[in-house]
Amino acid sequence: MAANVTHVIDQLRPGGAQHILLALARSEPQAKVCALHGPGTNDEMVAQFPRVEVLARRKYALAVILSGLVRMILRDRAAVLFNAHLETSTLLLCLLRRIVRFRLVVTIHASQGQWPRWFRWVFRRVIFLADHVIVESQGVLEEARRLGLSEAKLTLIPIGTMRPPAKIEDMTKDIRREFGIPANAPIFLSVARMVPGKGHMHLVRAMPGVKGAVAVLVGDGPEKVRLQEEVRILGLEGRVFFAGVRTDLENFYPAAVAFVMPCLDESMGVVIYDALSCNLPVVAFASGSIGEIVTDGVNGYLLPPDTNALAAALRRVLSQETPFRFLAPENYSASAMVDRHNALYLDLSRRWLGPHPSGIHA
């Protein structure tokens, strides 16, 4: 028996929450995915989901989004669990939960420090309207407890990667040739959306202290222009490369000597699981939940948020002084995450979706 789940997310684009949602949607025969709006939605990614609907093509078409959500809830509420992902979906479904009776699960994909400022205030007031809350790290679990959410409403399910371990023989493109990187230059890889909290600027500013190596930054975002200007100021053209958004990461992980994650607050990091499954050491700031995945001196280095410390750690990687050790790839897989989600959905369905009151709250 499988639970009927409709996942509601703000938009579908390459990202950690979307990666997790794709794993869940592919594993649940009855699961549907509803994206609120189209801007930022990636058509190639949408096509990967078995059952998906996009409510509006414009981000701020609130009337269209709300009417679509209400129709969907009224139609399916007797037999469906609704699972909200990301900020707008969580806010709208929690508010609708005050008016229409339906069963709502909220997944928290980030720590409070990563949320938009407006959402921090709103979240603390609406999250108690959810029937159940899923968190993905111990750090976020502690945040939820401090908000006052009861243990009965909380479930911790660590994430994982769907990406099979990439090996040199799996590469279909030579990224050294694509970007003009010398054959003997070690590559430090970073994969993240380019926003200040991801810490790309620390990596760029660390590179002058790491002679002979290059950095490849995969991703895009509003911070990219500042990063490119900093590369120009530091004279790092030819040593820092901007790869843009890529779907062929199997060509990047095997080419690198380390994965760099200088985030100032990171609560999930699917790309860290990707890197570790490829036996790639992770050099990261000890922020958020990264320490739940990376062990200093074992499968990478954990550092204070400091550019000089980052440069020193990258030099240590090149010196090969640490014999890094990694778990088998299946330990970083999304399989356990998917199984635990499905078991939770089934348990909640059995408890909630028997005879269920319908209609509008009095």
Image (cartoon, rainbow, N blue to C red):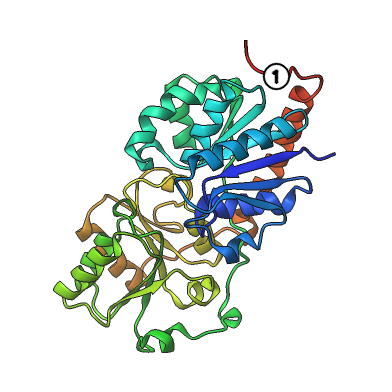
Q: Is residue 165 left or right of residue 63?
A: right
Q: Nearer the viewer, residue 219 or 286?
A: 219
Q: Residue 266, position in %: x, y? A: 40, 47
Depicted 52 relative to depicted 206: above or below: above
Q: Who's the residue at 67% across and 57% down the image?
A: 49
Question: Under tag 1, what secondary structure?
Answer: loop
Q: Residue furthest top?
A: 362
Depicted 354 relative to depicted 158: above or below: above
Q: Residue 152, position in %: x, y? A: 61, 21
Q: Which residue is mark 1?
A: 359
Q: Within the image, what quadrant is residue 329 found in?
A: bottom right
Depicted 285 relative to depicted 67: above or below: below
Residue 209 in sight here: no
Q: Residue 254, position in %: x, y? A: 50, 75
Q: Who's the residue at 19% across and 68% down the image?
A: 230
Q: Within the image, what quadrant is residue 182 found in?
A: bottom left
Q: Amino acid at mark 1?
A: Gly
Q: Residue 110, position in %: x, y? A: 45, 42
